[in-house]
């Protein structure tokens, strides 16, 4: 299977690329659950824009550079990963497969990639950590700062190496597929495992309501900075002024992201905002990008525009739905092979060797 650089032709078992996992997953999933994963806000203009932004851009490779097979490893916030691809935080993995986040975490551990565990996971952060992946924890800062602190401590104790604060969700985006399907609650027996609160005075345990709060501000980030010594990653930045503010407020990394087009519809593709954010941040903190990454060439394009690494959301969920742990592993293997191939064909020795001139401002359409 590892035919990169050898020129050998190998027969792949379908799905042979990340996109082909989506129809395979759709065939297996409850239609309402498929819609929950696939959908975005309102007209889903931003969902489409994310992928289109990669398709539009042309790569201009260098030739005869004699670089040999590329090395894919990167170090992000002191964590070495086998490639510059992380698993973006996505909620409710047990909707995709009964093994849920256990399967995803084991696949991440096997692949040596960083998994950003969602606060809204269907197994606990401790259970995910026990599967052994390199782990970061995504947090929606809850207005109850005492409860937020308890989540932070649990993430620290579980061995998470960074906190990823989602900034683009002061409210839930309007997902009309959910409205149409009447899908507003998890099925019986499934719940946000991190939100379970011990029952007091002999009462049963309760699952706390998740609060997305329009009150959140940079003051909350300052509070978090005082509360933990873990690196803080701010996810969901599209505006260069916010990127500058984030750096001023001491964040350790930024994820340029529009939440996979699930929050405010008609915001630009995250790839289209990456150069502006990179310009504003001027290398002061590492930059990640998510939204629409489906190909090894997409990873190269993001690196060329200033990202240190990318994250994938839906493709991992499709892999999970198709074949549990093996499906997520397959998605990561396909992307790894594509990335190695794309770097080789671009004449780049490593992710760090990707330079802006590989994208020459040429549009394919
Ligand atoms: C998400 N995303 C997300 N982000 C976050 O910070 N917390 C969360 O709980 C979730 N949940 C979630 C569920 C589902 C089903 C999806 C598809 C996405 C957003 C996610 O982290 C990421 O930004 C996007 O998924 C990236 O876009 P692609 O790769 O899905 O195109």
Image (cartoon, rainbow, N blue to C red):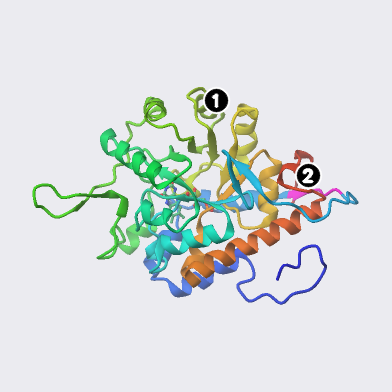
Mark closer to the chain start, 1 or 2: 1
Q: Nearer the viewer, residue 132 or 14?
A: 132
Which residue appears at 53% of the width and 40% of the height?
Answer: 255
Residue 358: assigned label: 2
Question: Is the distance from the Cβ of mark 2 to the nearest ligand 1 atom less than 8 Å?
Answer: no
Where does the image place residue 301, in percent across and percent down from the top left? 69, 47
Where does the image place residue 143, in percent across and percent down from the top left? 28, 35
Which residue appears at 53% of the width and 58% of the height?
Answer: 108
Q: Residue furthest left?
A: 201
How far apart are labels 1 and 2 at the CA level? 26 Å
Name the quadrant of the N terminus: bottom right
Q: Residue furthest top?
A: 248
Which residue appears at 73% of the width and 57% of the height?
Answer: 340
Residue 291 seen anywhere in this rendered image of the structure = yes
Residues rendered magenta in the picture: 58-62
Is 322 a magenta residue?
no
Quarter assignment of residue 159? top left
Classify residue 211 as left or right of residue 107. left
Q: Label 2 near label 1: C-beta < 8 Å?
A: no
Residue 333 vertical placement versus 59 (above, below): below
Secondary structure character of the magenta stretch overall: loop
Where does the image place residue 48, in percent across and percent down from the top left? 55, 53
Q: Residue furthest right?
A: 64
Question: For mark 1, what is the residue?
Answer: 244
């Amino acid at each position: 299977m590892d035919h990169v650089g050898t020129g050998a032709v190998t027969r792949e078992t379908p799905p042979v690329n990340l996109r082909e996992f989506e129809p395979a997953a759709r065939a297996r999933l409850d239609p309402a659950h498929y819609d929950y994963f696939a959908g975005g806000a309102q007209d889903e203009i931003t969902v489409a824009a994310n992928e289109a932004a990669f398709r539009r851009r042309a790569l201009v490779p260098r030739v005869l550079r004699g670089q040999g097979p590329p090395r894919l490893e990167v170090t992000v916030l002191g964590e070495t990963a086998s490639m510059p691809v992380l698993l973006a935080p996505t909620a409710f993995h047990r909707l995709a497969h009964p093994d849920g986040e256990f399967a995803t975490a084991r696949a991440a551990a096997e692949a040596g990639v960083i998994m950003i565990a969602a606060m809204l996971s269907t197994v606990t952060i401790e259970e995910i950590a026990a599967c052994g992946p390199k782990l970061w924890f995504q947090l929606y800062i809850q207005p109850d700062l005492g409860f937020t602190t308890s989540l932070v401590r649990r993430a620290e104790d579980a061995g998470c190496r960074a906190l990823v604060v989602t900034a683009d969700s002061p409210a839930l985006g309007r997902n009309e597929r959910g409205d149409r399907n009447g899908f507003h609650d998890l099925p019986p027996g499934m719940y946000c495992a991190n939100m379970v609160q011990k029952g007091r005075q002999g009462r049963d345990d309760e699952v706390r309501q998740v609060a997305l709060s329009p009150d959140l501000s940079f003051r909350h980030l300052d509070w978090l900075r005082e509360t933990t010594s873990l690196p803080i990653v701010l996810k969901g930045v599209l505006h260069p002024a916010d990127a500058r503010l984030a750096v001023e407020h001491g964040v350790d990394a930024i994820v340029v992201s529009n939440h996979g087009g699930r929050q405010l519809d008609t915001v630009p593709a995250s790839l289209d905002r990456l150069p502006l954010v990179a310009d504003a941040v001027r290398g002061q903190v590492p930059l990640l990008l998510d939204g629409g990454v489906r190909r090894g060439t997409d990873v190269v394009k993001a690196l060329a525009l200033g990202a240190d690494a990318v994250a994938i959301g839906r493709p991992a969920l499709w892999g999970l739905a198709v074949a549990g742990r093996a499906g997520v592993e397959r998605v990561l293997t396909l992307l790894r092979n594509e990335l190695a191939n794309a770097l080789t064909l671009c004449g780049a020795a490593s992710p760090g060797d990707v330079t802006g001139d590989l994208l020459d401002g040429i549009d394919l359409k």
